[in-house]
Amino acid sequence: MVTTNAIVMVDTDGVSPSGAAIGLEVGVVDALTGKLQSSIEVTRGAVPVASNALQAITYADVQFNDDQRLYAILNIAGASILGELDPVTGVFTDIADVTALSGIPISSMAVGLFASSYDASLGALFITNTAGELFELSYTAAAGVITSVDTVIFDLRGAMRDIDNQLMSNASIFFDRSGRMLAHDKYNGRLVDVDWQSGDGVTVDVGMTVATADGSVRPTVGAMISTQIIEAEEIGGDPNNLLVTSVTDTTLAVDNAPSLGTLSDEGFAEESAWLMTLTGTSNDSPTGQDIGKILVGGKLTGRVSLSGSVDTFYAGALLTGQSAGQGFGAAELAGNFSVAGDLRNLIVSDSIGSNGGGVYVPNYAGRYYTGFDLVVGGQVGQIRVLQDFAGSLTVNNNSSVTGYPAGLLPQNELELYSAYDDPAQMESDVFNLISAEGLFAADGRFYNDTFATAQRLGTLRTGVSGQPDFIRVAGMF
């Protein structure tokens, strides 16, 4: 959550930076430098709060008077307690027991920048529960702080359901600067809008104007909030006299993926996460990002979406699409492997889209298909699969797509062969990079020193009108 030049975060792993057991922590991070300013254990009545107690948290200016307060809902002995949390002292002050509102654990809360349906002087307060149900609450406030919540009078707007008509369980909600409610659909890994006004007590419309691609917002993202980044200049060297030069509405997100594993330089603590800016609600990235090599030593499932070009993509087995399996035929998740630019080399040492060739799929007997669907906006150089291929591919070869700058980044020789005498040749081959040598067996499968085993190369666009395409490769004979 964000204040002036500061970001407030909570740590729920139960481990301090020194490796000691600790309860729920709250910390303040400098938004400009990324450095931790303070960190303290959360207490309620001088008693530390369990690390797994947090159900929901939000900053809110409930009376529209520029008085931002941090609110949280904690699980205390099975009850959902709403309170105010001081991010500096860590003190949690009870406001109300809101367990009766939904009867099951609460998963998120948010206050809109518009009037409550119950009191026009207050911001609209919403919560969701772990079943994906959305509620608007009736409450009172004084001196900028919520003082009570009505647990008898409240509005169940309805259940949020995903594209498969499944309940969006554990989805988290927040409002953008325009007042639009957005929800993080953690099951499908995407962002959707929530039309809370459409709620009829049974269902709420979601994804009507915003529905990013599956996998675009990872399930490991733990929190999102919309805020403003304001840039200003001092006038006459006076820090109290500022001229605002720009105001940018933005959405911040924290991805907890790095903190899911212990870091080698932090003892036993898992204390790292990514702070990101959401680039928009229609695309993952505003600018195509070109990537050199992606090398995956085992099975790859889920979804791959690359906004630019990639030189070499390797996987032991490529099973994007329906991880649970689908029938043989058209992909149920279209475009589950998409490359906006050029794909020079797609190399898979086992199978694509199927468990043929010996791919082991736990708890799955018989033939297994995922509906692999490759869509490439630009050109494809080589697709090499050493076992089965089950899926579809579409190569658009769109001349308007910006591919790799061919003159600067030639194609690489793909080879792995153990009988090298010249260290320089080992360095020139993609699969002999020191960082990747453990992924591949030097068994002759990637050996291109004969005409029969020659590497196939696709032409590269020059990017210059009227100039012919060409082939340029980096390697050694």
Image (cartoon, rainbow, N blue to C red):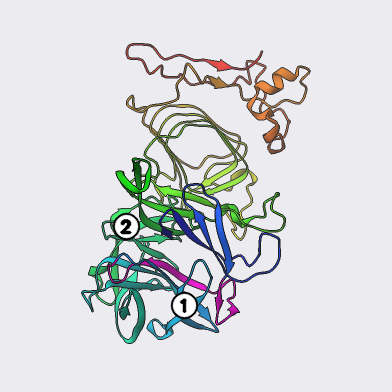
Viewer can see residue 385: yes
Contact check, label 1 and label 2, Cβ < 8 Å: no
Closer to the camera in the image, 18 or 420: 18
As measured in the structure, the alpha-carbon distance from the residue carrying label 1 to the one carrying label 2 is 25 Å
Vertical placement of residue 274 versus 314, above or below: below
Vertical placement of residue 360 versus 50, above or below: above
First in sequence, mark 1 or 2: give its number: 1
Residue range of the region highlighted in magenta in the rendering: 42-65
Vertical placement of residue 279 versus 412, above or below: below
| Residue 122 is a magenta residue | no
- Assign a secondary structure to mark 1: loop
Which residue is disc 2 drawn over? 176
Viewer can see residue 329: no
Residue 410 at x, y percent in the picture = 52, 19
Q: Quadrant of the C terminus?
A: top right
Residue 179 placement, left or right of 72: left
Which residue is disc 1 drawn over? 105
Callout 1 environment at 10 Å: few (<14), some (14 to 19), or many (20+)? Answer: many
Q: Nearer the viewer, mark 1 or mark 2?
A: 2
Callout 2 environment at 10 Å: few (<14), some (14 to 19), or many (20+)? Answer: some
Q: Quadrant of the N terminus?
A: bottom left
Residue 40 at x, y percent in the picture = 58, 66
Residue 253 placement, left or right of 61: right
- Assign a secondary structure to mark 2: loop
